[in-house]
Image: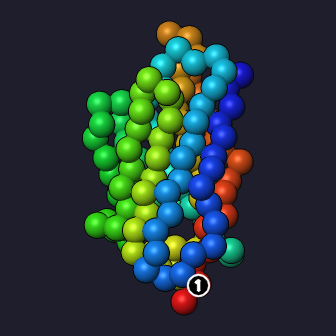
Amino acid sequence: QVQLVESGGGLVQAGESLRLSCAASGSIFRVNAMGWYRQAPGKQRELVADITSDGSTNYADSVKGRFTISRDNGKNTVNLQMNSLKPEDTAVYYCNFRVQTTILRRGDYWGQGTQVTVSS
């Protein structure tokens, strides 16, 4: 069993910053990719950013240059630094870990979601 706990959401004004964190615990052999997704009301969940085990990153075009994803492998955590926030960034943000619980068994795990609201 793997649990992900997110923190750091909140209400900010346009142009301000927030930092999201997500920590994994439980039966973990190795964490491969880590990522952040978001879902706005009435929209599908979309990838915001992800990072591989070797540190390669990928960002949605809408957040490039404003958001930075990072990971701490020793602590099984992933962070999302969000700068220059815009009202269109308002959504529930979810972390996602691709975890090997044993050398042969792997699965996708999700955090509970944290609300980010950006006012204009």
Q: In the rendered image, is residue 43 in sight?
A: no
User: Could you say where residue 34 lies in the image, as x and y percent from the top left?
Assistant: 46, 39
- Left of 11 or right of it: where is 49? left
Q: In the rendered image, is residue 57 in sight?
A: yes
Which residue is painted at 33% across and 51% down in the image?
Answer: 58
Which residue is painted at 66% across and 21% down in the image?
Answer: 26
User: Could you say where residue 21 lies in the image, as x and y percent from the top left?
Assistant: 54, 47
Give the mark count: 1
Which residue is painted at 48% across and 19% down in the image?
Answer: 30
- Which of the colour schemes (rainbow, by chain, secondary structure, one colour) is used? rainbow
Q: Residue furthest bottom?
A: 120
User: Could you say where residue 18 lies in the image, as x and y percent from the top left?
Assistant: 50, 63
- Left of 78 or right of it: where is 56? left
Is 106 or 82 nearer to us in this picture? 82
Is 104 or 82 nearer to us in this picture? 82
Which residue is painted at 63% across and 26% down in the image?
Answer: 25
- Name the residue carrying label 1: 119
Q: Is the residue 97 above or below the residue 63 in the image?
A: above
Quarter of the picture holding the N terminus: top right
Question: Counting other residues with Cα less than 10 Å from the Cα at mark 1, is it few (<14), some (14-19), or many (20 or more)?
Answer: some
Q: Is the residue 28 above or below the residue 2 in the image?
A: above
Quarter of the picture holding the C terminus: bottom right
Q: Is the residue 66 above or below the residue 105 in the image?
A: below
Q: Is the residue 90 above or below the residue 99 in the image?
A: below
Q: Amino acid at mark 1?
A: Ser
- Left of 67 or right of it: where is 76? right
User: Could you say where residue 57 lies in the image, as x and y percent from the top left?
Assistant: 31, 47
Q: Quadrant of residue 40?
A: bottom right
Element at label 1: strand
Q: Quadrant of residue 54?
A: top left
